[in-house]
Amino acid sequence: MHSSAMNTQGLATFKPPPTGEWRRLLLWIFWTFNMLINLCYVCISFATSSRLVQNYAGLASAFDNTAWRAPIAACVLGGIMVLMFNAMSCAVLIRKSINKSGPGFGYGFIMGWCFVMAFFTFLCGLVLDSFGDVIKSQLEDEKWKSYWTSAYYGTIALAFICSAFYLIFFLTMVIFQGGISKTIGLYDVNTDTKRRMEGGVQMNTLAMQAGTSI
């Protein structure tokens, strides 16, 4: 009876180790927030570049028209790079979350790319911001409406916001990279049962040794 009570008490107090699933959940939450901000930036960036292409060619001014390639390239390349990063990072995170094979090369590559994207989007914002006054002075006419100027400045703001979010997401990937590790993946029910049985055997052994010594 005493041995059975000790065994029951040992099984009742046995708790499985933490799974670390909350790390994976937080990693995906931060990725989702970053993706939503990036999606807004991509849409407004491509729209702004299209409007710039339609309007800059007809300028008759002392300002060199070839210089307009800089803001157009900043909008187009910024949007393309952001789209590529989100597609690749989603694929890598899905694969790592399913396999639970640890960070590995793919995860490290995405983490490094995220760090680079923080500075790339910041640079795109600086290039666009340098043409802000020119937009107001030379493009605002009957073809270029004032709301396009607002969209242009919105692109600048979102570029800087994306830069900040990439830095935050980079730190998140560094801190919560254990969320895709095999050692803290989903807790297996069979492993739980096995550990309970091992705990019960150990408790019975201790009880028998205690009874023998008495």
Image (spheres, grey):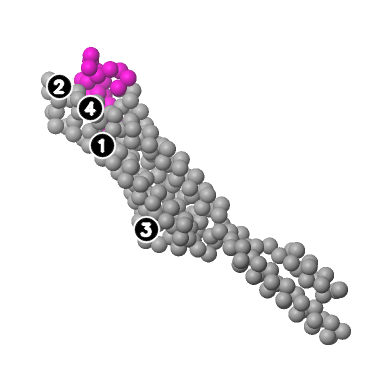
- Callout 2: 10 Å neighbours few (<14), some, many (20+)? few
User: x, y percentage for residue 99?
Assistant: 46, 60
- Callout 1: 10 Å neighbours few (<14), some, many (20+)? some
Label 4, label 3: how far apart the Cα atoms are: 37 Å
- Please tell me which of labels 4 and 3 falls first in the chain: 4
Residue identifier under label 4: 52
- Which region of the structure is painted magenta? 128-148
For marks 3 and 2, give the one nearer the viewer. 3
* Residue type at the position of mark 4: Leu
Q: Residue at x 22, y 33 (%)?
A: 72
Label 1, label 4: how far apart the Cα atoms are: 11 Å
- Please tell me which of labels 2 and 1 falls first in the chain: 2
Numbered mark located on residue 151 in the image: none
User: x, y percentage for residue 196?
Assistant: 69, 69
Residue 144: within the magenta? yes
- Please tell me which of labels 3 and 1 falls first in the chain: 1
* Residue type at the position of mark 1: Val
Residue identifier under label 1: 76
Residue identifier under label 2: 59
